Image (cartoon, rainbow, N blue to C red):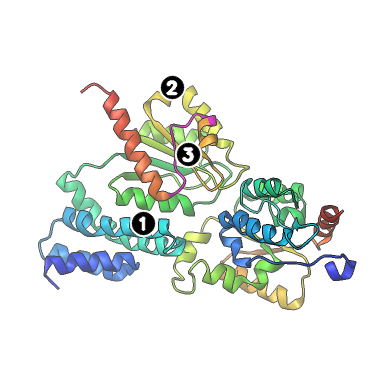
């Protein structure tokens, strides 16, 4: 297959159903045919993942469908990421993510990561059981636009406040947007711990993250 | 348990796969309980919070009915403090109950898409370090199933025989 439109359509369709080997093949075919990595990303992979997110919101897709589509996209991104970096494509922003200390749950967080990367964010994932000091060290190292704290358990949600206190103590609170999320988390809880943003699901997180970055950049004098 | 104790109770189950979609439990309970209240003197909900994060409590308050205490069935089988100790010792503890052992193929394998995409097992289970089975009635058949299920998750299995005494006492209090 060397017709760019067919390659784009194939990439879109195969990402949607999570056919990782075929997505990688089509990515290689597109590059071999001289297609730009941005074209493969923005005209096929990202729209496909947006459709996955929309189907999840409508209840047509569930967690496995999202994960398998995300895996397919991740395989293509492994191939495209260095090429995109070479071409100097700007990211929407940098999002540092982690599941809080004492909590090993990461499926929701990983879905958010997939959607964020699909939306053009650079995502740095610290994994699970991330202690406050590890968040602080990573913020100092990577200087992200947003840090995201994820918790699945009511017993680990209080770590949000511990992380916020650590940010204050390190003098970093004003330098980074804080978002929180996870199954038991609510807007009220996010407000109570002093987070800047909360989202109930992966798609909503992407929208909220973009809004928060826009708001922050609008406040900074050019 | 109802038959053994001779409780004057009719059990109306909700779909067991709500285990995987706890956000739907409160509305399902509202629908069934509202209907049952038209024909029954009393309705009680044999669910704990079960991942509804307070939504079920709110529905019960709205309908003036009672529910079981605790965060989830694991509390009711093992006891809150013992369960907390398991999770404090190893946050990567995956809990089985007899229900989950018996329905593992449907509730875990099929519902998580592992029958279609076995590679997702890594996404689901990579941070878990053990399975603890809170066994209510550990028959030989269930033991074999629990071992097979834990092996499928590539995790060691610990069996804790909890019985169902705590659940029975909680139900007794609920019906009092």
Residue behind mark 1: A54
Q: CA distance from mark 1 to mark 2?
A: 38 Å
Quick one: B125 or A186, which is closer to the camera? A186
Which quarter shows the N terminus of chain A? bottom left
Instruction: Specify whether residue A159 is in view.
Output: yes
Going from the N terminus, do you reach mark 3 or mark 1 first?
1
- Mark 2 or 3, closer to the camera: 3
Quick one: A143 or B110, which is closer to the camera? B110
Task: Determine whether A177 is above or below A156 in the image.
Answer: above
Which quarter shows the C terminus of chain A? top left
Task: Determine whether A87 is above or below A77 in the image.
Answer: above
Secondary structure beneath dot 3 equals strand
In magenta segment, residue B166: no
- Mark 1 or 2, closer to the camera: 1
Residue behind mark 2: A171
Res A208 → quadrant:
top left
Instruction: Specify whether residue B1 is in view.
Output: no
Res B109 → quadrant:
bottom right
Residue behind mark 3: A180
Chain of the residue where label 3 is placed in the rendered structure = A
* Stretch in magenta: A192-201
Q: Say few, some or many: other residues with alpha carbon within 10 Å of mark 3 (under 14 / 14 to 19 / 20 or more).
A: many
Mark 2 and mark 3 residues within 8 Å of each other at the beta carbon: no
């Amino acid at each position: 297959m060397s017709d760019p439109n067919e390659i784009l359509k194939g990439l879109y369709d195969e990402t949607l159903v999570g056919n990782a080997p075929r997505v990688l093949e089509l990515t290689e075919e597109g590059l071999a045919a001289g297609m730009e990595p941005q074209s493969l990303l923005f005209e096929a992979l990202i729209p496909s993942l947006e459709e996955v997110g929309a189907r999840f919101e409508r209840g047509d897709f569930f967690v496995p469908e999202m994960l398998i589509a995300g895996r397919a996209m991740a395989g293509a991104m492994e191939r495209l990421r260095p090429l995109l970096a070479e071409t100097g494509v700007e990211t929407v922003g940098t999002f540092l993510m982690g599941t809080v200390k004492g909590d090993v749950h990461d499926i929701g967080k990983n879905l958010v990561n997939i959607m964020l990367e699909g939306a053009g964010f650079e995502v740095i994932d610290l994994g699970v059981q991330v202690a406050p000091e590890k968040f602080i060290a990573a913020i100092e190292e990577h200087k992200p636009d947003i840090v995201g704290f994820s918790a699945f358990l009511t017993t680990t949600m209080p770590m949000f406040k511990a992380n916020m206190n650590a940010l204050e103590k390190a003098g970093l609170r004003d330098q980074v947007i804080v978002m929180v999320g996870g199954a038991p988390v609510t807007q009220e809880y996010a407000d109570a711990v002093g987070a800047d943003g909360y989202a109930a699901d992966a798609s909503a997180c992407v929208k909220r993250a973009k809004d928060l970055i826009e708001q922050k950049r609008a406040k900074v004098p050019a | 348990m109802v038959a053994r104790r001779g409780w004057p109770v009719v059990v109306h189950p909700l779909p067991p796969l709500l285990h995987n979609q706890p956000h739907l439990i409160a509305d399902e309970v509202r629908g069934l309980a509202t209907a049952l209240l038209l024909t029954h003197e009393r309705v009680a909900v044999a669910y704990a919070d079960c991942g509804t994060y307070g939504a079920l409590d709110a529905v019960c308050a709205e309908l003036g009915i009672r529910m079981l205490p605790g965060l989830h069935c694991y509390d009711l089988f093992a006891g809150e403090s013992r369960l907390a100790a398991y999770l404090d010792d190893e946050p990567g503890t995956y809990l089985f109950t007899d229900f989950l052992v018996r329905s593992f193929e449907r509730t875990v394998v099929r519902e998580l898409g592992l029958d279609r995409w076995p590679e997702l097992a890594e996404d689901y289970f990579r941070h878990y370090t053990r399975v603890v089975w809170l066994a209510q009635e550990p028959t030989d058949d269930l033991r074999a199933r629990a071992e097979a299920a834990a092996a499928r998750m590539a995790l060691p299995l610990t069996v804790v025989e909890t019985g169902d005494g705590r659940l029975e006492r909680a139900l007794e209090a609920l019906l009092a």
